[in-house]
Image (cartoon, coloured by chain):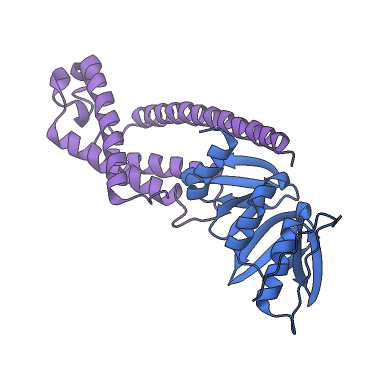
Chain colours: A blue, B purple
Amino acid sequence: MKITIDIDEAVKETEIKIHCNQLTADIENIIATLRILNQQMLVTRDGENYLLDVNKVSYVEALERKTFVYTEDAVYESKLKLYEMEERLCQSGFFRVSKSCLVHLKFIKSLKNDIERKIRLTMKNGEQIMVSRQYAEEMKKRLGVM
Amino acid sequence: MIKKNSIFDYAVHTMVIWGISILSICLFCALFGESAKEMSTLFRLGNRGISLETLMQFLVLAIVITGLRWVFFTDTLFKKLTVLFRSIWMLTGVIVSVGVLSAMWQWFPVNQVLPWIMFIVCFLVCACISVVVSMLKERSDNRRMQDALERLKSEENI
């Protein structure tokens, strides 16, 4: 893949243009990454592509090798793997709560200690998500209560 | 990475329960040993101490309690049980276990009603104190986490 960067001080708005003969999985991945940098993510639902505002995502879950993106009222699928999502979303208020789930702190309504040093999160829509022991310690550190 | 509980962690837990039980029995023994030696096998040596047999019986009790804790306070067997129901089941399990072991080893005169009532009352009072203390601690921890979450949200502007 050839990458060309053209620096011109006269340019008012940065533009990224992709020249290709067809839309491959690699290119879709690049587009998804760029969208997240732009606080948007490319997701699909019922075969249709959507550009989802990252601020509307309450959590992301990996299930059976697929990555699902949850908003308060809908579920979408993303082509990115969970670790790729984590790399891109950790600066936007997302936090890893288990091997298979990333949660947006903004959508956490309350949190409680549970058995075996786990934490039970209650989301704004009432859904409950468990923070595993491994990530509960990290979450407490981030909250500054350890 | 947090390690999973090993057999040694359970052994340590058993030893802690055993140690605390033996210390309590020693205290009772020193205070009431002579007057209680006719009533209970626990105090058969009066205020001179506790027998090897009693020590082993309490070790069995500590193992049973650790087992019950593994059953009700890990998600190995019950994954969806709430903390409240776990506590209720744990409490019931401990009462039944202590009752059965008391009857088996004659820790108190099991054919009389009064000792049973005293046992149940003592146990429930201790259990209530322990539940209230742990509930208060848990509530304060949860409040601290909730405040920290709100602070983090405002700090990170999310």
- The residue lying toward the viewer, choosing from B137 and A60, is A60
Asked if one can make out residue A142 in the rendered structure from this viewpoint, the answer is yes
Residue B143 point in image, percent of width and height:
62, 31
Rendered view: B114 above or below B87? above
Image position, residue B75 (x, y; %): 47, 53
Give the image quarter of residue B34: top left
Q: How many marks?
A: 0
**Going 77% across and 51% down the picture, which residue do you hit?**
A55
Q: Is residue B148 left or right of residue B43?
A: right
Position in image of residue A30 (x %, y %): 69, 68
Residue B1 vertical placement versus B17 (above, below): below
Residue at x 58%, y 28% (from the top left corner):
B140
Of residues B43 and A123, which is closer to you in this image? A123
Image check: B59 left or right of A14?
A: left
Place of residue A75 in the rendered image (x, y in percent of width and height, measured from the top left): 75, 65
B13 to the left or right of A72 = left
Q: Residue at x 48, y 48 (%)?
A: A133
Q: Residue furthest top?
A: B31
In the image, residue B114 sits, relative to residue B90, either above or below, namely above
Foreground of the two, A13 or B27: A13
| Extreme residue toward the bottom, this view | A21
Name the residue rendered at 56%, 31% in the picture: B141
| Residue A119 found in image quarter | top right
Q: Is residue B110 visible?
A: no
Q: Is residue A93 left or right of residue A117?
A: right
The quadrant in which residue A106 appears is top right
Above or below residue A94? Residue B119 is above
| Image quarter of the N terminus of chain A | bottom right
